[in-house]
Amino acid sequence: MNKFFKKYIGIVIVWLILIIAAIMTMPNSSRLVANQGQAKLPVSVQSQVAKTIKNHWGPKVSHTRQVFVVFNSGSKKKLNDAQTTRITSTLSNLDNKQKGLDIASIVKPSDATGLANQFISKDGTTQLAELTVGKRDSVRKMNTNLKQATRTAGVKTYVTSSDVLKSDSQQATKAGIWKIEVIAAVVIFLILVLIFRSLWIPVISLLSTAVSYLIALSVVFNLARHFNFPISSDTQVFMLVILLGLGTDFSIMLFNEFKQQLRRGSDQLEATLLARKNAGKTILVASLTLIVGFGLLGLASFNVYRSLAGVAIGIFVLLLVLATFTPFFMFVLAERLFWPSRNLEAHNYSRSWGFLSTQSVAHPIIALIIAGVVAIPFVLASQGRLNYNPASELNSDSPAKVGYKVIQNHFPNGQGTPVTIYIKADHKLQNDKDLMQVDRVTKQLQEQKGIHSVTSATQPHGIPLGQMYVNQQIEMLNTAFGNTEKGVKGVSKKLKKASISTSSLGQINSQSRAISQMMTSIQQQFNNNGIFETPEQMVNQMQKQLRDTHRRRLTQVQQNIILVALRRTMNDQEQQSQMNSALSSIGLKTNAINSSTTSFRNELNSVQSQFRSYGSQLNNFGVSIGLSNAFLKDVGQSPSTKVFYISKAILKSGIYKQTFAEYMSKDQKSTKLEVILDGNPSSPAAMRTVRGLQNQVQYDLNGTSLKNAKVAVGGDTSTMADTQQTAKASFKKITIIVGVAMTLILMLVAGSILQPVYMMGALGVTYLMSLGFTKWFSGQFLDQKFLTWNMPFLTYMMLLTLGVDYSIYLFMKYRQTNPDSKSSTRMINASILIGTVVISAVIVIGVTFASLIPSGVLTLIQVAIAMIFGLIIFGLVVPVIIPGLMKLTYEGFDFKWRNLKHKKRSN
C-alpha cells in the first residue's frame, strides 16, 4: 500500500506541475480565436478569389474592412437640422482622425449626390457613413475606437459590419464560457450529491475534469499558436461541455464500481485496482472510440469542422487523468469518499429501462409503429434552409445588431452587406473600349431581378455620366448645327438682296471706296460665319463660340461628326476658293476703277450676279445643314446610341480621375462593380443570385476586349454562399467517414453486425428528430424560424459522441450477460444494468448543455435544446426499439444468412 501511495503521490505532483505550466503558458484565447478562428474557405472559391484581388488593389482598399456608421433619430421623426449639423460635424472630425483610426476612406451622406437614398433614408430618420478601415487593429479595438469617435449628442449612433457582428459573437461565446463553467459545475455538484449522497465525489469528479480541461486547452491553443492547429470559437465551448459530460459520466461508472468492490469486502487498494480494471475497460473503449471519432474531423476540408479535432486531445487527457489522478483519491479516502453517507449499496438496476425493454420484446411491432409515428413529424420538420446571417447569433440588444437592423429597416436589405464584382485584366482598363464594356455589364446587372442598384467606374452613383454617352454628345451637336444653320441662312438672305448701283459714275470715286468697303465687310462677314473657311477652321470657330458662350467643349467624336457633315454639304471645294478669289479681285479692280470706268461697271454687274448666285448656294448649304441636323436628331433618339464613349483627351485631362480612382486598382488593371441586393442578403434567393453573377458577367464579357479577364464576386453574401457549399460538402464527407468508423468500432465491441446498425439507425432518427424539435422550438419561443448553419454539424457530433458512448456501455454489458440466454433476454438484462448509468449521465450532460442557454449565442442555445431533447429521446428509443429489433431479428425470423446472426459466445 505504501508503494502504491508513493507511486501515485508522485503522479499527482506531476499533474499539479502540468496544471501550473498549462496556466502559465496559456495563450490569449480571445486574440488567438480572433486571428485564427474565423471560417476559412478554399482559395479557389469565388469569395476568396475576390479577396485576393482586393488585397492586391492598392493602399485604399487592400487588407481593409468595410464598416458602416449608422445615425438614427431614435424615433419615427426625421433628423432635424440641429441633429444633421451635429452628424456633419462628427464626420468632419472623423476626417481629421483618419490616420489615427487607420481609416483609408470615408463616404459621407453629403457625398451621395447620385442616389438620394444611398446614404440617407427615404423617411429622413437615418443617415449612413461608409468607412474603409485598415486591419492594423483588431476588430474589437477598431469597434471601440470608432464608437468613441462617432458618438453624437442627441443621435442614436451604431457601428456595424459583418466583422463586428462576428467579433461580438465571439465575445459573447467567450463570456458564455464563464457562465457555462459556473452553472455546470454547480448543477453537476448537486446532481452527484443526490446520486451518491456524498460531498467528496462531486469535488473529485469536478477536479479531475478541471485538470483535464485546463491542460488540454493549453495544449490545443499552443498547437494553434505555434503549429497552426485548427481552432474556432466552438473549440473551447464544446471541449468544456464534452469533458464535463464525459468526466462526470466516467466518474459515476468508476465510483459505482469502487463502491461495489468495497461492499464485497475488498480493501481500499484492491477495490481501487478492481474498479479501475472493470470500469476502466468500458472507459478505455469509449474514450478511444471518441478519440477516433473526433480525430477523424481532421480530415474535414472546412476548418470550423476541423477545429473540433482538439476535443480528441481533451478526451485523451481525461483518460489519463481518470487512470492516474482520480484513483489516488479513491485509494486515500476509501469509504470516506462517500462521506457523509455510510451506505455502500450500489443501486445499479433501472426499473424504467427494464419495463420499456420488456414491453418492447413482448410487443416489438407495436413498439416500432409507435416509435415511427412519433418520429415522422419531427423528422419532416427538420428539413429546410439554414441561417447564415451572423447578426442572428447575437442578442437583440447588441449595438452592432441594432445598427444592422436599422439599416435593413430603412434601406434596401442589401445596403449593409454590398456585393462586389471584381474584373481583373492583363492590361490597363482606363480606355474607352474597356470602359464601354464595363458600362454595358453595369446596365445589364441593373436590369436583373433581385438587384436594387449597381455602381461602377462609369456609373459611380448608380446613374450614368450623361456627357459620356453618344446620344448626349449628339444632342450637343444638334444644338451646334442649329446655330450654324441660322447663321448660314442669314448670310444667304443678305447676299440675295445685295445691289450695286451704276447710274451715277460722276461720283465714281466715292462709290468705289464704298464698294471696296462693302467687299471688305462682306468678306469679313463670310469669314465670321465660317462660310469660306476650311471645315477644320469652321470646327475650331464653333469650338471657340461654344466655349465663350456656353462654357462647353466639343468632344473628339463630336468634332468628327461635324467635319463629316461639312465635307458632305460643301460639295465643291473649288467654289470656296473661287469666292475668295472673286472678292479679292473685286477689291483690286475697285482700287483701279478710275482707270477703266466701263470695265468697272461690267465688273460690278458681274459681282452682283455672283453675290446672288452665292446666296442661292448658301441657301442650299443651309438646307443641307438642316437635313443633317434632322438626321442626327433621329440617330440620337435611337437606343443604339446610348453607348458609353470617352475620348483620349478627356481621359488624359484628369477630369474624372477621382471617379476612376474609386473603382480602379492602383495599376488600373482591375475594376469593381458594387451591387446592392433587394432581398435579405442571407436568404437562399440572394445566395442563388450571387452564385450566378460570376458566370453572367463572364458570359457578358465573351467576345469583347475583356474576354480573358478574371471575374470574381466578393462580399458577405458571396462568402455566405461559399460557406454554404463548402460546409455542406464537408458535412456530407464527415458524416460518412465518422459514421462508418463508429459503426465498425461498435461492431468490434458488440461482436455483431446488426446490433450496431440498429443502434446507428436509432441515433440517426434521434438526430433528425432533435433538429425538427429545435427548429419548431426556435420558431415558437426564440423568434428564429431557421437553424443556424453550423448547428446541425455540432449537434451531430455531440449526439453521435454520447450515443456511441452509451451504446458501448450497453453492448459491453450485453456481452457480460449469460450467453446461453436468448438475445432479447440478454438485451433486457443489459438494459436493466446500464439504465441507471445512462439515465444519470443523460441528466448530467443534459444539464451541462442547458448551461449553454444563458450564453445568448443562438447556435449554442439551439445545440443545447437539440441535445437535451435528443438525449431524452435516445434514452427512450434504446430500450423501446433495440430489444424489440433483437427479438424480431434473432427469434422472430429464421434467417438463412448465418453470418448476419448474432454469434453466441461459448463458455
Image (cartoon, rainbow, N blue to C red):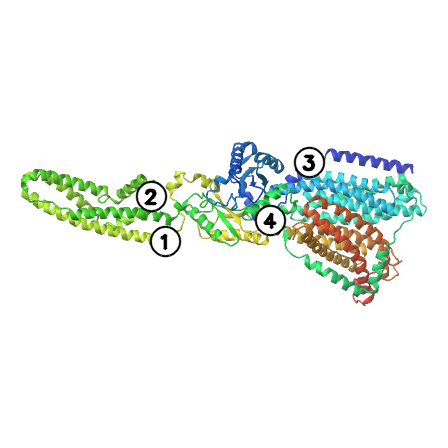
Q: How far apart are marks 1 and 2 (CA)?
A: 20 Å
Q: Which mark is residue 554?
A: 2
Q: How many labels does the image show?
A: 4
Indicate which disc, 3 or 1, sits on the residue closer to the N terminus.
3
Q: Which residue is drawn at 54% across and 32% down?
A: 97
Residue type, label 2:
Leu
Q: Which of 110 and 604 is in front in this view?
A: 110
Residue wearing tag 4: 720
Question: Judging from the image, what secondary structure is the residue with disc 2 in?
Answer: loop
**Label 1 or label 4, whichever comes before in sequence order:** 1
Tag 2 and tag 4, C-beta contact below 8 Å: no
Q: Which amino acid does label 4 sit on?
A: Met
Q: Is residue 58 among what the camera can see? A: no
Q: How far apart are marks 2 and 4 (CA)?
A: 48 Å
Side of 251 where 373 appears, left or right: left
Residue type at the position of mark 3: Asn
Dividing the picture into quadrants, the one containing residue 372 is bottom right
Q: In which quarter of the image is residue 52?
A: top right
Give the residue type at disc 1: Gln
Task: Give whichever of discs 2 and 4 has the lower sequence position.
Answer: 2
| Label 3 secondary element | loop
Instruction: Say whether marks 3 and 1 touch (CB < 8 Å).
Output: no
268 with respect to 706 (left or right):
right
Residue 694 horizontal/vertical position (percent): 52, 51
Q: Is residue 695 above or below residue 358?
A: above
Position of residue 74 in the picture relative to residue 579 (left or right): right
Crowding at dot 2, Cα within 10 Å, few <14 / some 14-19 / many 20+, comes out as many
Mark 3, residue position: 28
Distance between mark 1 and mark 4 Cα atoms: 44 Å
| Of marks 1 and 2, the one in the foreground | 1
